[in-house]
Image (cartoon, helix red, strand yellow):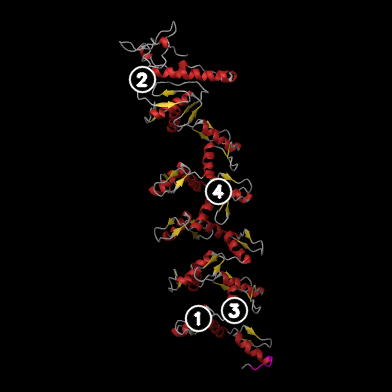
Amino acid sequence: MAASAGSGRAGAEGPKGPGPLGARAPAEGQPALRSLPAGVRPAPACQQLITFKDVTVDFTQEEWDHLGPAQRDLFKDVMLENYQNFIFLGPLGQERTCETKNSTLEEDNYLGESSMNRFTMDTNEFGETFRQMEYLIEHHRIHSGEKSYQCNECEKAFSCNSDLSVHQRNQSGEKSYQCNQCGKTFNYNSYLTVHERIHSGLKPYKCTECGKAFRERRYLTIHLKIHTGEKSYKCNECGKAFSQRGSLNLHQKIHTGEKSYKCIECGKAFISYSVLTIHQRIHTGEKPYKCNNCEKAFRQRGHLTDHQKMHTGEKSYKCNECGKAFRDRGYLMIHQKIHTGEKSYLCTVCGKAFRERGHLTIHQKIHTGEKSYKCNECGKAFRQKGNLAVHQKIHTGEKPFKCNICGKAFRDKGYLIVHQRIHTGEKPFKCNVCEKAFTDKGYLTIHQKIHTGEKSYKCNICGKAFRDKGYLVVHHRIHTGEKPFVCNICGKAFTDKGYLTIHMKVHTGEKSYKCNECGKAFSSNSGLTMHHRIHTGEKPYICNECGKAFRQRGTLNDHQRVHTGEKSYKCNECGKAFKEKRYLTIHHRIHTGEKSYKCYCGKAFRQKGNLAVHQRIHIGEIPF
């Protein structure tokens, strides 16, 4: 269909107007359109527009496969020349060009829809390649801004028919493509194709760097940015950069406070539909992602992926500062804030800052008093789901975390980790003031309040204040008389579990803590610590009134009552009061007649000291 310069009359514009095809004369240097073949009449005025399909030669796949390379190149050259001739048949309007490898194609012509395939054309302006001529034509409309396809419902316009079709399906809710495996339906076939790979396990897109495979090309493209470090999308508010535009869009909602997606069950709002979908599974109980190894199910695919690394032991994400490795990238990012000191999440009530948003969310419940997680057995409520899970093991008696050194079992993995530091001697939490080290961060936090003098937890009955909430809980039991920890052997009850643990060693005779100086053994670490002060002469507890020093805080407390005259311990029988509880205990034996300390000669005494004095008579020692 090559053009002939001498046959331009059929399309030339005469003095009285355009020719029969409605085409104007070509510019100087441009090929003219050839004359119509004999026997072909010009189209009537109302049918002057023709489509590119009318002047194309199309091949079936079988025909195309039989063509040689030279024949295919000739086909492309002819079709390109046809296209150059064809674009002069319509009004040009505003001229814009998209340069191909071999020619310049003008836009804003009525081209219609071509069925010609396998015609590759490139645009130098954007470097895009098209497999079909109609794709190039659609691409031209991006530059021209032409949107020829309009929705009848909402009048929204589109540059190509396929976009309009997708839009109309979204409007109507039509989902024509159904999965044969699970019955799920989709708006169009490409979504179904990707979905079916979930069932088949097919992941055709593989990363050449690390070998990780993906079901969709776009996920591979996103993944590759991890290796290149590319983050093309930057927030104008805070400067944070992202590898995906969608991630930037979600991030910007943090600044605007926009939460467009609301749960119809509880009213909670979210910044994205996907987060809402995951949240709704809390209400439905749905856990679609199941582990093939242990059958444990999860609401989110990411949680399953992290869980499976427990079975494989894989820890792909390594800290460049200290070398510590993590199963999940998010954990690595949180860990790195330890090195940088970054605490991005600030409490608006008290100003306390946190490294993780989750920690801030939990902290804010202290101010609101919210305790969302309630035990079905005893009704006790908790701020965190994890604390409820650990608590419920009290009722079931489950202790799944066992020490491989001494065999002791724990309800929570965190307790096991702290316990194992007893065996290793590791004390990673160090006080900046006195250099004292601790096995657990909580112990360090309590200890630091000694230096600051902070006592945040106050008894609403007697006004006494404590550094730690646990101490306040134990103290409350003095007022209520509650002693929940009972010895199975002698029935003695205690206000604190630690006291029961120490007491049990009276029955077992266990004394695990031995003094390196004199070899004396003790049933508790605190007993050994106080004993050590005999050797060192340390008396850290000093009376502000008289300057007298003591090895134990309790002894100082008893001494201070000498100055105040306070006698807090009163006998219910006779009303006599005492400065120390132990004196009241001894006094009670007068009323009960109890004499717990018995000599082998049969004589009994109320106090251990009296028995010791008596026994000296038998050995011939003069007591004083």
User: Residue at label 2?
Assistant: 91
Q: Are marks 1 and 2 in contact (CB under 8 Å)?
A: no
Numbered circle sitting on residue 303: 4
467 on left or right of 596 = left
Q: Is residue 619 magenta?
A: yes
| Residue segment shown in magenta | 618-622
Element type at mark 3: helix
How busy is the neighbourhood of tag 4: few (under 14 within 10 Å), some, or many (20 plus)? few
- Inspect the image, locate mark 2, and give the three-letter code of the amino acid beneath it: Pro
| Label 4 to label 3: alpha-carbon separation | 50 Å
Instruction: Of the two numbered discs 2 and 4 on the same chain, state the one appearing first in sequence.
Output: 2
* CA–CA distance in space, label 1 to label 4: 53 Å
Identified at 41% across, 19% down, the residue is 87
Which residue does the numbered mark 1 point to in the structure image?
Answer: 556
Residue 265 drawn at (x, y percent): 45, 47
Q: Earlier in the sequence, mark 3 or mark 1?
A: 3
Which amino acid does the dot numbered 3 rest on? His
Where residue 167 sits in the image (x, y, percent)?
A: 43, 31
Q: Looking at the image, which residue is at 57% across and 33% down?
A: 180
Q: Residues within 10 Å of mark 1 (few under 14, many from 20)?
A: some
On the image, numbered disc 3 is attached to which residue?
A: 531
